[in-house]
Image (cartoon, helix red, strand yellow):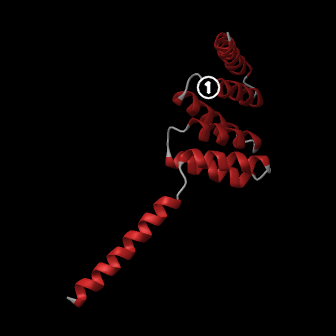
Amino acid sequence: MKFIRHFHKILTLILFVLILTQCSEKNSREYVKEGLEHLKHEQYDSARKSFLKAIEKDANNAEGYYGLGGIYNYEKKLEDAERAFKTVLKIDPTHHNAWYSLGFTYELMGKKDEAEASYKKYRRLKREIDSLMNQEKH
């Protein structure tokens, strides 16, 4: 009987610890917010880690990949930036800022035609979004 009570106490303690760790863990969107906050303070390594955690939590978090692409551009890791922005666009083909950033990355890579194609898609999507926003105002 004493063993069962002792086992029950240990099991309760383990469950309590597991519940606490689940409650304190951030979700994917919170990691993106954290990464953006790090960027404001020019803490690029910390921002990269936060964006990677966001992606780890949710592989379909476009904003996590978008932030990561920006970090890679800053670090001149252009192939990694290209990959990150293309992933954003696989998740959300209407992410107009990703089209712009991909164009900028291509520009840095010296890929003029690809850059112009991305900028063209950015401009088209931006016009469509602006038009929708104007319709909502009326």
User: Where is 117 relative to 84, above or below?
Assistant: above
109 vs 92, left or right, is: right
Quadrant holding the N terminus = bottom left
Count of all numbered marks drawn on residues in the image: 1
State the residue at coordinates (76%, 42%). Answer: 74
| Residue 135 position by quadrant | top right
Q: Circle 1 is placed at which residue position?
A: 95
Percent of width and height locating residue 29:
57, 44
Name the residue nearer the viewer: 11 or 110: 11
| Residue 105 position by quadrant | top right
Quadrant holding the C terminus = top right
User: Where is 137 relative to 92, above or below?
Assistant: above
Percent of width and height locating residue 108:
77, 31
State the residue at coordinates (56%, 23%). Answer: 93
Task: Identify the residue at the far right of this view.
Answer: 41
Task: Identify the residue at the far left of this view.
Answer: 1
Percent of width and height locating residue 66:
64, 36
Task: Identify the residue at the far bottom of this view.
Answer: 2
Percent of width and height locating residue 72:
70, 42
Name the residue nearer the viewer: 77 or 40: 40
Q: Residues within 10 Å of mark 1 (few under 14, many from 20)?
A: some
User: Where is 71 relative to 3, above or below?
Assistant: above
Q: What amino acid type should be assigned to the residue bearing mark 1?
A: His
State the residue at coordinates (60%, 35%). Answer: 83
State the residue at coordinates (53%, 50%). Answer: 27
Name the residue nearer the viewer: 83 or 14: 14
90 vs 138, left or right, is: left
64 vs 74, left or right, is: left
Name the residue nearer the viewer: 110 or 123: 123
> Which secondary structure, mark 1?
loop
User: Where is 14 relative to 132, above or below?
Assistant: below
| Residue 107 position by quadrant | top right
